[in-house]
Amino acid sequence: QVQLVESGGGLVQPGGSLRLSCAASGSIFRLSTVAWYRQAPGKQRDLVARVTNSGSTNYADSVKGRFTISRDNAKETVYLQMSSLKPEDTAVYYCNLISPWGDYWGQGTQVTVSS
């Protein structure tokens, strides 16, 4: 019954910025860990960043210092602010919500970094 609505993907030049959003509904949001994953063609889906229900965060080494994950419980939305983007960041980005009642995935949004 839970749906994750993603937005913010697109085409950006190297060095540019994008802000991804993942919106969820229902009281389960406040009890959930939310993560961003990404998958490039021919490669496995890898964890990019994670934020727990208590607000703690962690990041993949490849994005530390460039990406920031945050959550707004009032809006039931998680954000991924991406700066200093590189061509290697090109991938489909997925929102993943882990709750005591189940795991849910967004539909994925394409991020392309190219000059």
Image (cartoon, grey):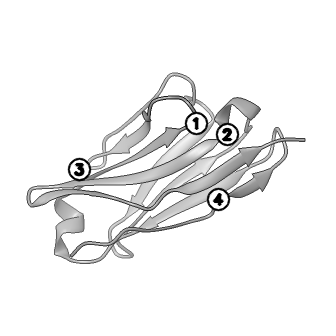
| Pointers 4 and 3 in contact (C-beta within 8 Å) | no
Q: Which mark is residue 90?
A: 2
Q: Amino acid at mark 1?
A: Ala
**Which residue is disc 3 drawn over?**
54
Classify mark 1: residues with Cα within 10 Å, few (<14), some (14-19) or many (20+). some
Q: Position of residue 74 (x, y in %)?
A: 34, 75
**What residue appears at the point 63 percent right and 35 percent down from the top-left corner?**
66
Query: Which of the two discs, 4 and 1, sits closer to the camera?
Result: 1
Classify mark 2: residues with Cα within 10 Å, few (<14), some (14-19) or many (20+). many
**What residue appears at the point 73 percent right and 38 percent down from the top-left corner?**
85
Task: Determine the CA span between mark 2 and mark 1.
Answer: 7 Å
Q: Indicate left or right for 42 with 112 as reference.
A: left
Q: Name which quarter of the figure residue 30 lies in.
A: bottom left
**What residue appears at the point 57 percent right and 30 percent down from the top-left corner?**
63
Q: Which image quadrant: the C terminus?
A: top right
**Which residue is disc 1 drawn over?**
40
